[in-house]
Image (cartoon, grey):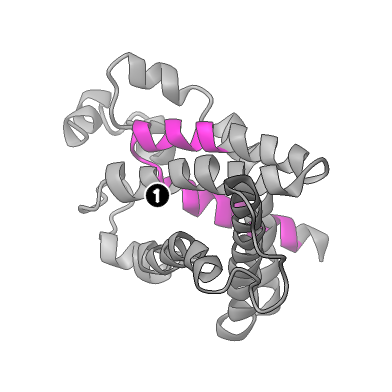
Amino acid sequence: MIKEFLEQLRIQRWDDHRYYHHSRINQSLHFVSALSFLLAYVWLFIDPVVSGLVGWLVSMTSRQAGHFFFEPKGYDHINQATHEHKEEIKVGYNLQRKVVLMTIWALSPLVLVLDPTLFGLFKPFASATDFMRQVAKIWLAVGAGGLLFRTVHLFFIRDIETGLVWMTKILTDPFHDLMLYRKAPLALMRGELMDPGLHLIPEHTLGFIPEHTLEEQHA
């Protein structure tokens, strides 16, 4: 049971890396996101409000900016898959779902403007600091809600194991991304905009595909 769970976790992580992290800019932003998420995890036990602000204003924005603005949307020659196919088979939040989630996050502070008590849950804010602390609490709820919603959704459209594996992957991604993309900023500073993806192609490892051919594909 545990062995199967860990194997599914490995597969989801591997698919996420090979399908959605070709850009060195995206990888570097994921490295920044991972560092800030780890900080947010620590502050969750100190001051959850600070954790919410760091998690959304730094971690999530840098992470999703990499996907929206820098990750190529054309045909994936390494994996022989179209962008549309990858979006269709995405286990978690594809770009369309991310647009919905990020829109909810961006508009959620308006709820406090319309009702400063948030239906009686908060005391009306008396300063900008009070307002931001209440917004951060809402953002924590949005983050937890988005995680739980997709997890339960996967229970029904896939199975319970897939949902639990995905939730585990999301919660542990900062640790994994920190190790996986730690060299991306240096590669980017060397002028390498795209990951050659040599580790993704067994044929290259066996010597059947020259390295310069793959570099031409990513030029």
Viewer can see residue 72 = yes
Residue at the (53%, 49%) spot, across then down: 14
Q: How many numbered marks appear?
A: 1
Is 24 covered by the magenta stretch?
A: yes
213 over 96 or under it: above or below? above
- Which residue is at 52% across, 70% downward? 111
Describe the element under mark 1 as helix, strand or loop: helix
Q: Check the image and name the residue furthest to the front.
A: 126
Rendered location of residue 218, percent (x, y)? 22, 34
Q: Amino acid at mark 1?
A: Tyr
In the shown orientation, is residue 72 left or right of residue 139? left
Q: x, y percentage for residue 217?
A: 19, 36
Residue at (23% x, 28% y) in the render: 215
Q: Position of residue 97 (x, y in %)?
A: 42, 69
Q: Main secondary structure of the magenta part?
A: helix
Say whether residue 23 is magenta.
yes
| Magenta residues (range) | 4-33
* Quadrant assignment for the N terminus: bottom right
Location of mark 1 (residue): 20
Instruction: Answer left or right for 57 relative to 190.
Output: right
